[in-house]
């Protein structure tokens, strides 16, 4: 069964996965989704999870780039991006980049002067829809990034200066091979690099630039386009797969937490906090899976990370 990535071009978290697919050399199919809701052919597959990207393998749907990369590591263990010898270091750095550095670059790229060209390109009607969509995403908190541009710039320097020094001594963040940490720092800086108003912030950092070029050289691999409706049909025609052996073993739910097979919800903790409900198929230290029956998508298993999501008993 082909891997299907639901994504859009300007999404930095999607860029992380596109580049990882290039690195792994896995062929994939591309469903280009709208940058704003509604996404009527995708929601039956995700059960309501609305963030981007989402990776589909038949009736298995992986939400959040952490869950996606854990799955890709299973498919390509020889190129694992969270290899056993570096699993904690790589995941911790990646998590910090995806939360802290992400907020820094969003604060810089969405400050009024930097966002103006993008909004002008969208046109007034679409710009208004985009702003309303992102206000809904952040749950009325105004913006995902609450940092002022000057605080964000200081935080960026605090990352780039030591990164420059470190990259003078080795090709990747944790050694001779890339890990999930490289892709997670990269996709944040990618957003900065493609914004003409703030990209100059990267200019003094030559080793960082050379490292970004090394990662970009992995490319996006071989892909073909798919329609959203075709992807939905792929989900309907497939059944959730047996769990990878690497995820087998004891369930990892906290004491008093929901039992396997019981009704649960899984909800992002930071933004886009829409609960996905179903029955708990499995839970490991890193991931959990929720089984759902959807009138359009059929029997689907939706996978989430444990970190950054609340897994709760329902009913
Ligand atoms: N922690 C999530 C973050 C994903 C995220 O924030 N994606 C952005 C796009 S780059 C998003 O969902 N934006 C709103 C949307 O696409 O609806 C992950 O690793 O996948």
Image: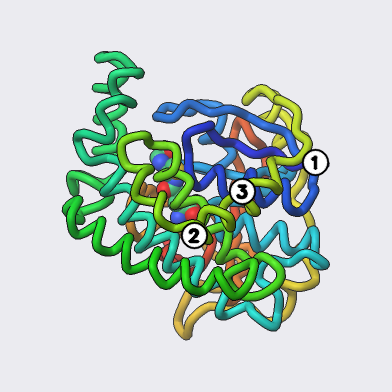
Earlier-in-chain disc, 2 versus 3: 3
Q: Does dot 3 land on a helix, a strand or a loop? A: helix
Q: Residue at x 76, y 46 (%)?
A: 239
Q: Position of residue 122 (x, y in %)?
A: 34, 18
Left or right for 41, reference 159: right
Left or right for 239, reference 126: right
Q: Residue at x 73, y 52 (%)?
A: 23
Badge number at residue 185:
2
Which quadrant, please, contains the N terminus?
top right
Q: Does dot 2 land on a helix, a strand or a loop? A: helix
Earlier-in-chain disc, 1 versus 3: 3
Q: Nearer the viewer, residue 106 or 33?
A: 106
Badge number at residue 27:
1
Decide: few, some or many residues near mark 2? Use Cα within 10 Å; few <14, some 14-19, many ≥20. Answer: many
Q: Nearer the viewer, residue 99 or 44?
A: 99
Q: Are marks 2 and 3 in contact (CB under 8 Å)?
A: no
Decide: few, some or many residues near mark 3? Use Cα within 10 Å; few <14, some 14-19, many ≥20. Answer: many
The answer to whether any part of residue 50 appears in the image is: no
Earlier-in-chain disc, 2 versus 1: 1
Q: Nearer the viewer, mark 2 or mark 1?
A: 2
How far apart marks 1 and 3 lie (CA) works out to 12 Å
Q: Residue at x 40, y 29 (%)?
A: 36
């Amino acid at each position: 069964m082909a891997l299907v990535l639901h994504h859009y071009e300007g999404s930095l978290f999607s860029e992380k996965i596109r580049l990882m697919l290039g690195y792994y050399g896995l062929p994939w199919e591309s469903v280009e989704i709208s940058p704003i809701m509604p996404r009527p052919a995708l929601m039956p597959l995700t059960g309501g999870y609305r963030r981007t990207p989402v990776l589909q393998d038949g009736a298995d749907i992986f939400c959040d780039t952490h869950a996606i990369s854990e799955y890709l590591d299973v498919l390509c263990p020889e190129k694992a991006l969270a290899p056993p010898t570096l699993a904690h270091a790589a995941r911790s750095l990646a998590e910090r980049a995806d939360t802290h550095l992400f907020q820094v670059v969003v604060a810089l790229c969405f400050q009024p002067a930097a966002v103006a060209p993008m909004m002008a390109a969208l046109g007034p009607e679409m710009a208004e829809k985009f702003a309303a969509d992102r206000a809904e995403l952040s749950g009325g908190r105004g913006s995902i990034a609450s940092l002022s541009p000057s605080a964000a710039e200081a935080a960026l320097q605090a990352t780039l200066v030591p990164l420059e020094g470190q990259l003078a001594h080795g090709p990747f963040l944790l050694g001779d091979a890339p890990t999930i940490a490289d892709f997670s720092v990269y996709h944040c800086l990618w957003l900065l690099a493609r914004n003409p108003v703030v990209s100059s912030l990267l200019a003094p950092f030559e080793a960082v630039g050379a490292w970004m070029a090394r990662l970009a050289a992995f490319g996006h691999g071989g892909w073909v386009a798919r329609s959203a409706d075709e992807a939905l049909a792929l989900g309907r025609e497939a059944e959730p797969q047996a769990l990878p052996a690497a995820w087998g073993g004891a369930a990892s739910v906290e004491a008093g937490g929901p039992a396997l097979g019981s009704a649960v919800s899984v909800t992002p903790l930071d933004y886009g906090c829409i609960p996905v409900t179903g029955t708990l198929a499995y839970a490991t230290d890193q991931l959990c899976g929720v089984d759902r029956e959807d009138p359009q998508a059929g029997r689907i298993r939706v996978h989430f990370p444990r970190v950054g999501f609340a897994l709760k008993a329902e009913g």
